[in-house]
Amino acid sequence: MGHLIGTGPKHAISAEQPTPSSLDLLDPRTRILAVIFFAILTVSLSSLPILMMCLATSLILLFVSRQPIRPTLRRMAAMDGFIIFMLLLLPFTMSGHPLFTVLGFAFTQEGLLKAIEIALKANATILALLVLVGTLEPVIFGHALHRLKTPENLVHLLMFTLRYIGVLHEEYIRLRKAMKMRGFSLTNTLHTYRSIGYLVGMMLIRSIDRSERILAAMKCRSFTGKIHLLSNMRYTMTDAAFAIIGLLLLTIFKSLDFFV
């Protein structure tokens, strides 16, 4: 299966070539499990100082990973764009002690604290995900998920999506160029909506047709639905040390949150 997806993008989240770092010495399974445990613990916390410590931990991982800081933080900020309206409206919709009033809506202290809490949780988790998992190659990421007993159908879906999303995007670009050559332009008319509908329908038809050809080609190459691993993954002392330090740090965070 590696020959089908090895020509795709090198990284699941960023196509930029990462700078080698000490995190590359870790087993991919260790990095995935670390993100899962970190996310679960971060979501369970409620103390703002401890959440700031979690965000600081993610920033430290960013510096250790030697990833480009500005593009990584920009991707994290893109995630904030999806929740910014919720964070802005939360102080006006949550009951509590009002700090001031805008057009009859009270801006409460409890809502403000809850919005800050959600922002810290989201940014700490997303940044850790970008640093630890976002730089893994799709093939390695898929193999690591398979080794962690993730259902094979989900792994197949992930790996084929990463491989062929670029191909489908190129197909979309070709269709858009063909429409422009025929004088099509986006306007607020019924003809535009109908043309966009035809475009989406044609994309679906071509996607189904391509998937059938890919499946036939894979069957000709004796594909039976099994993932054949290209490399042997094994835990090392580096993974053990990272796991011990991580569990100790998470235990400290949880203990401090309990007593604060």
Image (cartoon, rainbow, N blue to C red):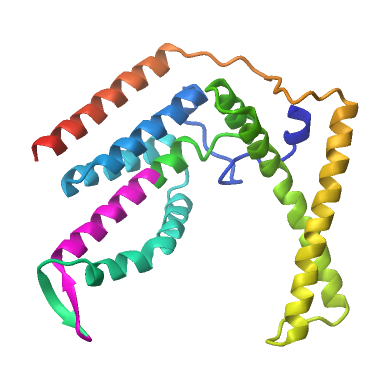
Check the image and report above or below for 232 versus 115: above
Residue 211 location (% of width, % of height):
81, 44
Residue 242 location (% of width, % of height):
36, 22
Q: Residue at x 45, y 35 (%)?
A: 132
For the N terminus, which image quadrant?
top right
Magenta span: helix, strand or loop, mainly? helix
- The reply to whether residue 88 is visible in this rendering is yes
Check the image and report above or below for 118 versus 237: below
Residue 8 image-quadrant placement? top right
- The reply to whether residue 22 is visible in this rendering is no
Q: Would you say residue 17 sits in the magenta stretch? A: no
Q: Would you say residue 117 sits in the magenta stretch? A: yes
Residue positioned most to the right:
220
Check the image and report above or below for 26 versus 256: above
Residue 260 image-quadrant placement? top left
Q: How many marks?
A: 0
Whether residue 118 sits left or right of residue 3 in the image: it is left
Residue 227 location (% of width, % of height):
70, 23
Q: Residue at x 78, y 84 (%)?
A: 191
Q: In the depicted view, which residue is nearer to us: 164 or 149?
A: 149
Residue 153 location (% of width, % of height):
65, 32
Q: Which residues, given as a range, are shown in magenta? A: 103-125
Q: Residue at x 31, y 64 (%)?
A: 87
Residue 7 image-quadrant placement? top right
Whether residue 137 sits left or right of residue 49 in the image: it is right
Residue positioned most to the front:
95
Q: Residue at x 63, y 39 (%)?
A: 158
Whether residue 195 sits left or right of residue 29 in the image: it is right
